[in-house]
Image: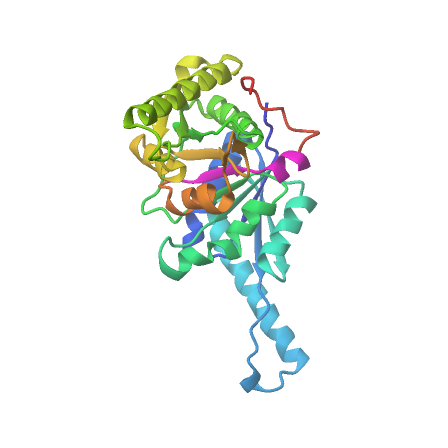
């Protein structure tokens, strides 16, 4: 069973990160875990036309940024006393993504929680600058949280688990089981099969039979997967979908009012490879709820302490 002892909450202290703070507190309460609230003070930008900046002035600017960050944390933590949460502050300097990745390792964090910004225009393109790198390289699973339009529920009632039965998605299932058991939540298991590509050498009937065969194969693999699960079968509802994986995952999460999406990344099933830039990145950007991603790197880093994922034979 997955054990979460320390949650690293990385924030830029902007209003967009408030939803991620809510998720960090929710998971801290759920697992009785310590929360390490982390902020990286970025080096000030000095433009050439500003001329020479004395070192003491530069240091004063950095120190002012640190004081502002500490004041922001004091306001953020005002609600912590009396809540039963254990929260510790960690301020760092330097490149944001690099310092956060180092903190994950140094703190032996079991989970990283980070907010994402807007979903359109340049903000969408810049997801890869910090959040995307954290999802790819963090030595633990990453929960990305979009700026939600309204305050989410205080409890996790429904989890959407997207799987292609790859090693990373099987490891992600261990997280689904732990979360569902802790929160007494139900699970929607989503498996997406691709539509056969139209071929002039194949009749429409042949293509339809191929699509049906893929659906049947997917259903059989799902049932085998669940036979060995610790989660009671009645707690899991299956959704076999056809089409574009990322779009279908987001659709079912929205359709079922999921509180959380859990998925593995950098996995593959057959000839279909799930690459972060195509499926997971789309889900992170478009999801109506937080997304917990489990990568092959995080599996390797936590191999001695993580329960092995369960699931059917390949």
Q: Is 106 located above or below residue 95 in the figure?
A: above
Magenta highlight range: 289-301
Q: Is residue 291 magenta?
A: yes
Q: Is residue 99 left or right of residue 234?
A: right
Q: Nearer the viewer, residue 100 or 19?
A: 100
Q: Is residue 126 magenta?
A: no
Residue 305, image quadrant: top right
Residue 223, image quadrant: top left
Q: Position of residue 61 (x, y in %)?
A: 58, 73
Q: Is 111 located above or below residue 63 in the figure?
A: above
Q: Nearer the viewer, residue 227 or 26?
A: 227
Q: Position of residue 5 (x, y in %)?
A: 61, 34
Q: Is residue 126 left or right of residue 137?
A: left
Q: Position of residue 93 (x, y in %)?
A: 63, 62
Q: Is 159 located above or below residue 88 in the figure?
A: above
Q: Quadrant of the C terminus?
A: top right
Residue situated furthest front in the rendering: 201
Q: Nearer the viewer, residue 277 or 57?
A: 277
For the point 60% across and 70% down, which residue is it?
62
Residue 82 visible in the current orientation:
no
Q: Quadrant of the N terminus?
A: top right
Q: Is 125 located above or below residue 270 in the figure?
A: below
Q: Position of residue 289 (x, y in %)?
A: 38, 40
Q: Nearer the viewer, residue 201 or 85?
A: 201
Residue 122 visible in the current orientation:
yes
For the point 51% across and 30% down, which residue is it?
269
């Amino acid at each position: 069973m997955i054990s979460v002892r320390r949650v690293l909450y990385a924030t830029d202290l902007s209003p967009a990160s408030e939803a991620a703070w809510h998720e960090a507190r929710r998971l801290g309460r759920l697992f009785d875990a310590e929360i390490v609230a982390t902020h990286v003070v970025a080096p000030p930008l000095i433009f050439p036309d500003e001329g020479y900046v004395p070192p003491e002035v530069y240091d004063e600017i950095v120190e002012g940024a640190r004081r502002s960050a500490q004041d922001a944390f004091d306001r953020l933590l005002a609600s912590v006393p009396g809540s039963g949460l254990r929260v510790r502050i960690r301020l760092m300097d330097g490149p944001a993504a690099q310092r956060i990745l180092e903190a994950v390792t140094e703190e032996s964090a079991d989970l990283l929680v980070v907010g994402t910004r807007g979903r359109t225009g340049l903000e969408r393109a810049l997801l890869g600058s910090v959040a995307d790198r954290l999802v790819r390289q963090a030595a633990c699973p990453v929960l990305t949280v979009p700026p939600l339009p309204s305050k989410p529920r205080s409890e996790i009632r429904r989890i959407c688990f997207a799987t292609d039965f790859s090693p990373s998605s099987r490891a992600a299932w261990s997280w689904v089981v732990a979360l569902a058991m802790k929160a007494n939540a139900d699970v929607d298991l989503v498996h997406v099969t691709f539509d056969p590509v139209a071929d002039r050498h194949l009749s429409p009937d042949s293509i339809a039979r191929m699509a049906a065969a893929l659906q049947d194969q997917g259903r059989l693999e799902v049932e085998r997967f669940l036979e060995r699960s610790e989660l009671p079968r009645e707690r899991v509802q299956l959704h076999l979908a056809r089409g574009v994986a990322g779009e279908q995952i987001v659709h079912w999460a929205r359709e079922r009012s999921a509180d959380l999406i859990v998925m593995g990344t950098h996995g593959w099933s057959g000839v279909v490879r799930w690459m972060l830039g195509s499926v997971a990145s789309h889900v992170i950007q478009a999801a109506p709820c937080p997304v917990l991603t489990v990568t092959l790197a995080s599996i390797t880093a936590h191999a001695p302490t993580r329960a092995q994922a369960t699931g059917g034979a390949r």
